[in-house]
Image (cartoon, rainbow, N blue to C red):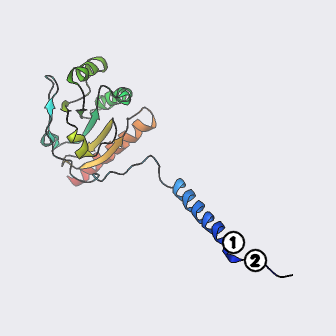
C-alpha cells in the first residue's frame, strides 16, 4: 500500500491555526475600546473660542498654570446629559472643568445649562468644529486632562459614567496631579 500523504494538503490547516492563534492573542490583550491619541504627552493645540451668552469664556493660554479638565459637549448629545451628573461630582471635588460647546446652537446650549446646571469654570463655543479637529475629537463627549504646562495627560473618549468609568477618570486625574507635583 502506497502512502498518498501530500504535505501541501496541510498548508491551509497550518495557515488557519496561525491566524486563529493571532486573533486569540490580540483579543486577550489590550482593551479593544482603547483608542490611542497622538496628543497624549504633547502640548494641547492653541485655540480661541467665542463666548456662550454672557458666560465667562477662555482660550488655550488661560489653561496654563493649573491642572484642568477640558470637556467637549453639546446640548444635542444624549451621552453628554448622562455624563453631566459625573461632571458635577468632579466639580464638587474641586476639579476645574472648562467646557467647549461643539457645533451647537447657543440658545439650546444655554437651555441645557439652565436645566442640568453649569459645571464649567468657563465655556467657549466651537461652532466651526476646528478646535475639536485640532484636539482629535471623534465623538461627544470627550474630556482631556491638561497639566499646568499645557500638556495633555489623558483623553477620555465618550462619557465619564458612574462607577468604574468615574473611578478611572479620577485615578487618571490623580496620577496627573502627582506627576505635576514631582515635576515642580
Residue 170 lies, with reference to residue 28, above or below; the image says: above
Q: Secondary structure at mark 2?
A: loop
Q: Which residue ends up furthest to the bottom in the rendered image?
A: 2
Residue 136 picture location, percent across and down: 28, 46
Lateral position of residue 117 relative to residue 62, left or right: right
> Can I make out residue 57 in this image?
no
Residue at the spot x=13%, y=22% of the render? 54
- Tell me whether circle 1 and circle 2 mark residues in contact (CB < 8 Å): yes
Kind of element beneath mark 1:
helix
Residue 123, position as x, y percentages in the image: 19, 30
Q: Is residue 105 left or right of residue 5?
A: left
The numbered disc on residue 63 is none
Q: Residue furthest right?
A: 1
Q: Residues within 10 Å of mark 2 (few under 14, many from 20)?
A: few
The residue at which mark 1 appears reads as: 9
Q: Nearer the viewer, residue 182 or 105?
A: 105
The residue drawn where x is 22% and y is 50% is: 151
Would residue 182 be seen by someone viewing this image from the given angle? yes
* Count of marks overlaid on the render: 2
**Height in image: 141 above or below 29?**
above
Residue 126's place in the image compared with 30, above or below, is above
Residue 121 x/y as whole percent: 20, 30
Q: Alpha carbon of mark 1 to alpha carbon of mark 2: how far? A: 8 Å
Percent across and percent down for residue 25 are: 55, 59
Residue visible at 50% across and 55% down in the picture = 29
Mark 1: few/some/many CA within 10 Å (<14, 14-19, 20+)? few
- Classify residue 92 by image quadrant: top left
Image quarter where the N terminus lies is bottom right
What's the residue at 27%, 35% (across, down)? 72
Q: Quadrant of residue 10?
A: bottom right
Per the image, the residue denoted by label 2 is 5
Front one among 22 and 44: 22
Amino acid at each position: 500500500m502506497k502512502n498518498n500523504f501530500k504535505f501541501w494538503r496541510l498548508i491551509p490547516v497550518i495557515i488557519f491555526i496561525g491566524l486563529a492563534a493571532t486573533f486569540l492573542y490580540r483579543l486577550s490583550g489590550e482593551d479593544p475600546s482603547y483608542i490611542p491619541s497622538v496628543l497624549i504627552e504633547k502640548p494641547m493645540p492653541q485655540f480661541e473660542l467665542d463666548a456662550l451668552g454672557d458666560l465667562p469664556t477662555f482660550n488655550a493660554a488661560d489653561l496654563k498654570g493649573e491642572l484642568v479638565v477640558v470637556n467637549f459637549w453639546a446640548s444635542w448629545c444624549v451621552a453628554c446629559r448622562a455624563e453631566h451628573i459625573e461632571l458635577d461630582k468632579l466639580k464638587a471635588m474641586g476639579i476645574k472643568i472648562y467646557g467647549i460647546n461643539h457645533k451647537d446652537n447657543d440658545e439650546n446650549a444655554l437651555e441645557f445649562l439652565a436645566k442640568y446646571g453649569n459645571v464649567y469654570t468657563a465655556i467657549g463655543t466651537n461652532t466651526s468644529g476646528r478646535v475639536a479637529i485640532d484636539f482629535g475629537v471623534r465623538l461627544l463627549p470627550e474630556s482631556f486632562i491638561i497639566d499646568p504646562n499645557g500638556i495633555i495627560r489623558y483623553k477620555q473618549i465618550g462619557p465619564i459614567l458612574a462607577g468604574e468609568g468615574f473611578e478611572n477618570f479620577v485615578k487618571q486625574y490623580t496620577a496627573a496631579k502627582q506627576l505635576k507635583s514631582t515635576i515642580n
